[in-house]
Image (cartoon, rainbow, N blue to C red):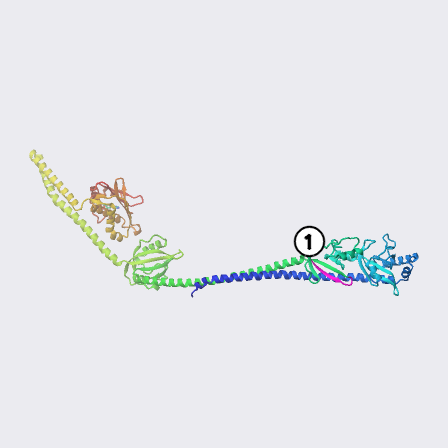
Amino acid sequence: MTIDLQASEAEPRSKHIRRVWIQALAAVVAIAFIWLAGEGTAQREKQLQVDAIHRTLEVQTLALRGTVARYNRIPFVSGQQANVHALLKSPRNDALVNQVNRYLEETNRRVGAEALYLMDTDGNTLAASNWQEPKSFVGDNYAFRPYFQDAKAGREGFFYAVGTSTGVPGLYLSTAVREGDATLGVMTIKVSLGEIEEAWNRNKEPVSLIDAHGIIFLGSVPDWKYTATRPLKADELAWVHKHWQYGDRQDIAPVAWSQRSPAEGRSFDTYATLDGRKQHLLALEEELPEFEWKLSVMSDLAPVQWARWIGYAMAALLALVLLLAFKILQLRERRYAEMRRHRLQLEKRVQERTAELQEAHAFRKAMGDSLVVGIHARDLQGRIMYVNPALCEITGYQPDELVGQPPPYPYWHPEDLDKHWQYFDAVLSGQNTLHGFESRIRHREGHDVATMFYSAPLIDGMGQHNGWVTSVVDITDQKRAEEQQRLQAARMQRSGRLATMGEMASTLAHELSQPLMALGSFAGAARTYAERGHRELLQETLLDISIQAKRAAEIVGRIRGFVRQQTPGFQACTVNEVVNNVLALMRPEIRHQQARVIVQLNAELPAIQADRVLLEQVVLNLVLNALQAMQDKYPVDKVVRVETGLQGDMVFIRVSDRGPGIAAPVAEQLFEPFFTTKPEGLGLGLNICRTSVESHRGRLEFENAPQGGAIFTVYLPLES
Ligand code: ADP
């Protein structure tokens, strides 16, 4: 599977532009939705208010019409009375006046009106229901009032005004009192609309009653009373003054409604201060054509505004919730896409890794197969997990006979089981086993194979220690060759030493026998001459003796000179070179002994003038002695330490071992010629060593190490 990264990287730009467009569109839609929701809610609330106002209007209109209907027949009915007619005909008849007064008073009381009164055709009040009250209408003339004029002209009088006598406003309903075609007078009833007004006052919505001139004459808001809802023309104002409609008010101020919006049908909205608070109001008007009035009811628009804001808020909330839901969906979608992409990448990586691993495995297998060195891997418990063909070749076992096996492994040599277990434990306990472990193994077919084992910890990719890998090298051939070489060298060393010793001994014997024999016979002769008193002869013989002694000394001197002649002589060399040469020479012997040599050379040592061959013989002897002293030890304990260093004006070579050390009786004779504790020893090694060292003006010292073992140190002067 391939991933088209090119395409997915090129996409974002166009995708980005598309996303910006979609976001802008979503923002426009959201704003439109919020606006529509706000306006819709406001409209609904407004409609509810309009409906409520309509209901109020209907109720109040009915109440007004009911009030008028209740009273408007009363003047006519009262005017039918015979004594009313009689009074109109004889106005000065006090008895009639009295009768009619009482009648009107009684009627008025019954119908519950403000006043009921009778005027003659000139407008003079002849009788009135309030004839007994201080502000009685009796005697007053109301000819200037339109209701009088209308009634006199044969129409129904209908007029709302402030009373000229009482100052109390009321609705005047009047009709002519007739007899045949003749008009005798005018009967009028004044009705108070106070109760209606009181009912309006209880209403929270402002209600106003407006006359034909647009003047509010009745209403629930006292401040608006007697103010004009439209500009009054001069003649209209004059008419109002003339008919004393609203008392002695000279001017009618415009109503305190501001910013009135153009009326839509019968409704409009406006701002006005009510209860000390500026309010936005919705007003609705109802025409009462029969009275030429208009009834206006208003309602506070604040709830509409509230509804609008609530609408906005709800829609915004909804939009937010939708946006959030959309975002969550989008995020989820994105996460899924991300996860899909990751999975694809992971699959690809797994495939790549698998291919790499297969390749590495194939490579490792080819490597393992091609190796001549045997390899096996073990887990932490020592169970074999893997063997390569070379190991099978070396041991003679098939992989399935080895894999899964815990120790002891079938190829361990039965006589070396202890050594194998020791090495196994050393490996498992993490001891340094890099220098290898030499051991025999038993081939499946029964013969022995000499091997070297090298182990290293198996650490996996996470740094976890999983087991051990051991390489097994077949060193049988090498061992055989080394053994032969060693035997040869030992033989040669031995025969060389013996030859030299023998030669020296026979030379010494031969050379010295003559002077010694001569000395013996001269000494015998001297004794005889001395006994016999032959002084001269004695003297001669003693001279001969000294000559022979001198000769013997010459012989010894010659041999010493001969020993010196065999070496190339003094030359500049370093003790480090000497040590390195000796160790290189002795490597087969050291390996054979399964010993370990720890070398600690001071690299800064200056060169000295010395006979390198002699010094090499010294070091060789000391190392050989050390190895021999540790012969009975386990290989792990066979450690020779060779150090070089500087002490004062001397360089030193120190050879230490972990053998038994030097016991006191041995120490006394250590440097004596022919002293040895070894069955095949010559007892000359240390003696020659000391002579050689002393010929360099140096000294050879020994001591026992506190932790056991002997320490031999050769000190050589820097300046010889
Ligand atoms: P040889 O090695 O032939 O015995 P040497 O003169 O080299 O002769 O040694 C004399 C004796 O000193 C040895 O037989 C041995 O007992 C003792 N000796 C020498 N070197 C050591 C040593 N490193 N540890 C213990 N004993 C030693």
- Residue 413 lies within the magenta run: no
Residue 354 percent across, percent down from the top left: 39, 63
- Residue 281 lies within the magenta run: yes
Q: Estimate how packed mark 1 is, as few (under 14), some (14 to 19) or many (20 or more) residues with alpha carbons within 10 Å.
A: few
- Identify residue type, mark 1: Lys
Highlighted range, magenta: 275-291
Residue placed under numbered mark 1 in the picture: 278
Q: Is residue 646 above or below residue 263?
A: above
Q: On the image, which quarter does residue 694 sit in?
A: top left
The quadrant the C terminus occupies is top left
Residue 534 located left or right of residue 333: left
The quadrant the N terminus occupies is bottom left
Residue 334 located left or right of residue 124: left
The majority secondary structure of the magenta stretch comes to strand
Residue 70 percent across, percent down from the top left: 82, 62
Residue 327 percent across, percent down from the top left: 54, 60
Q: Is residue 515 visible?
A: yes
Q: Is residue 615 above or below residue 28?
A: above
Residue 161 percent across, percent down from the top left: 80, 56
Q: Is residue 277 above or below residue 711?
A: below
Between 169 and 141, the one nearer to me in the picture: 141
Between 704 and 602, the one nearer to me in the picture: 602
Q: On the image, which quarter does residue 210 sit in?
A: bottom right
Residue reaching furthest to the front: 235
Between 251 and 63, the one nearer to me in the picture: 251
Secondary structure under badge 1?
strand
Which residue is at a point 42% across and 63% down the rendered structure image? 348
How many numbered marks does the figure carry? 1
Between 275 and 213, the one nearer to me in the picture: 213
